[in-house]
Each structure stands twice: as C-alpha cells, then as structure tokens.
Image (cartoon, grey):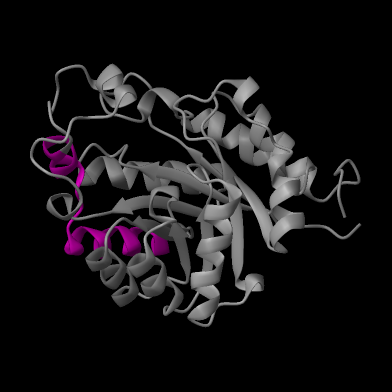
Amino acid sequence: MTARHVTIIAEAGVNHNGDIALAHQLIDAAAAAGADYVKFQTFNAAALVTASARKAEYQSRNMGDEASSQLAMLQRLQLSAAQHVELIEHCRRKGIGFLSTAFDLGSVELLDSLHLVLWKIPSGEVTNYPYLRAIARKSGHILLSTGMCDLADVEAALAVLSRFGRQRSEITLLHCTTQYPTPYEEVNLRAMTTLRQRFGCSVGYSDHTLGIEVPVAAVALGAVVIEKHFTLSRDLSGPDHAASLTPPELASMVAAIRAIEGRDVALVD
C-alpha cells in the first residue's frame, strides 16, 4: 500500500461570529493544529433567504432568541470581499490554505476572483443547476458534499459537471450526514464505499459527530479528504459551536489521521 496524504479541512465556517479578529484566531488555531486548509463560508444573506425565513431547529437550539430570523443571523455572519482578502493574506503568513464554500452565484464569482484552487459544493446546492454549471466552468478540484442527497441526486450533479467539462478524476465526493451533531448510529461510513464504487470518484468524509473517532475511522476506510468543524470554544454563542472541536481536539484529530494515513492498518488500497 502506498502512503496517502489525507487533505484535512478545518471548518471554521461561521464560527467567527462576524468578528474578523476571531476569524484570524481560528486561522491561527487551524495552522497550529496542522490542518491543510481552514474553510469559511461565503454568501450574500439577502440572496439566500427571505426576511420571514426561520432558523433551523439546531440553530434555534444553539442560539435561543439571538438573531430571531435566518436573515438576521446570516447578515451578522457575512464576510465582506475585503475581509476575504485579509483572511487569505493571514493564511499565507501562517502557511495554511484558505478555502470557502460559496452559497450563491455572486459568491462563486467572488471566490474565483480570489484565485481559489479548490471548490466545495454544499449538499444544499447539489440540485442547483446554475450553481453547478458555474462551478464546473472554474478551474480547480471539486469537493461535492452528499449530505442531503440520494444516489440519483449525486448522479444528476455529476452529469451536469461532466456536461460542462469536468472529469470524475477532478471530483471528490464527501459522505456527510446533515445532522448537528450526528449520532454515531446515523453515520454509516460504508456509504463511502458505495459512492466510490458507484461513481468512480475519490471519496472523503465531512463530519458532524462529536469527537474525533469517526473521521479517523473514515481515513482507515479510504477517505482522502476530512472536513471537520472547529471553534475556539464550544461556549461561544452561534449556530455551529456546539458541534465543533476545540483547538486541542483538532490537533489530536490531525495527529491521529497522520498516524493512520501511511500505515498498513488502512482497510483499502
């Protein structure tokens, strides 16, 4: 078996709480932990939700009455173009890759103007034809999350990406369970094997469980990308902090994955 380098994405997401200083600290923590990328989220809140849209159940549970609507919450968490540039420069200084998920077409164009080389398609956009077409026309590898998809959805998305010039060798499918946090009994890591065999793509795992055991197990089952939320403190207020790793836990996960990835304990070639 040849050694693999698993790409580890430390998902800062919106755990900066709209505070650029906190975003810088998240970059510092991800770099110190040894992650390959730190990932944020890029969106125009007004282009995503209506003023009457309610927060998801887990968001309300984690935030209470804070930012009572989905729009108010997202507006507080939105990063400007100038802040993106600032964070990218900070990542360069720290020696870690910058990555962000775009949630609307304008945000795709913003990230393209910043010369990103890796694209993340969130599972909520897998059935969004214009979005898929826009991503397919950019250069760089594609990570496609399957958290809200069935196999037919994945097949259809791959067909769109192929129609606009993408090869399956340029796409990694991320198994994911869209539940925050995800109970162990809902994980089903064998879905990675199904995705690999059915679609001929490399596979990874986007994790929402508590702890580090499941992503480490995913590496042993052949995941080449691991994405995991992290925060500076689970006591912070915000939608995703409660299901995120702390910096010491993130460092432990990275160390465990690095120990596993090049060893013969891996269960697949």
Considering only vertical position in the picture, is 234 above or below 204? above
Taking 168 as reference, is 17 left or right?
left
Residue nearest the viewer, comparing 253 with 197: 197
- Residue 132 rendering spot, x and y as whole percentages: 41, 67
Residue 210 location, x and y as percent? 54, 23
Range of magenta residues: 71-93
Image vertical order of residue 137 relative to residue 2, above or below: below
Residue 81, quarter of the rendered image? bottom left
Viewer can see residue 226:
no
The x, y position of residue 245, in whole percent, is 49, 29
The picture quadrant where one finds residue 52 is top left
Q: Which residue is drawn at 13% across and 44% down?
A: 75
| Quadrant of the frame with the C terminus | bottom right
Majority secondary structure in the magenta region:
helix
**Is residue 7 part of the magenta span, yes or no?**
no
Q: In this view, does 245 lie to the left or right of 254?
A: left
Camera sees residue 95: yes
Rendering coords of residue 29 (x, y %): 44, 41
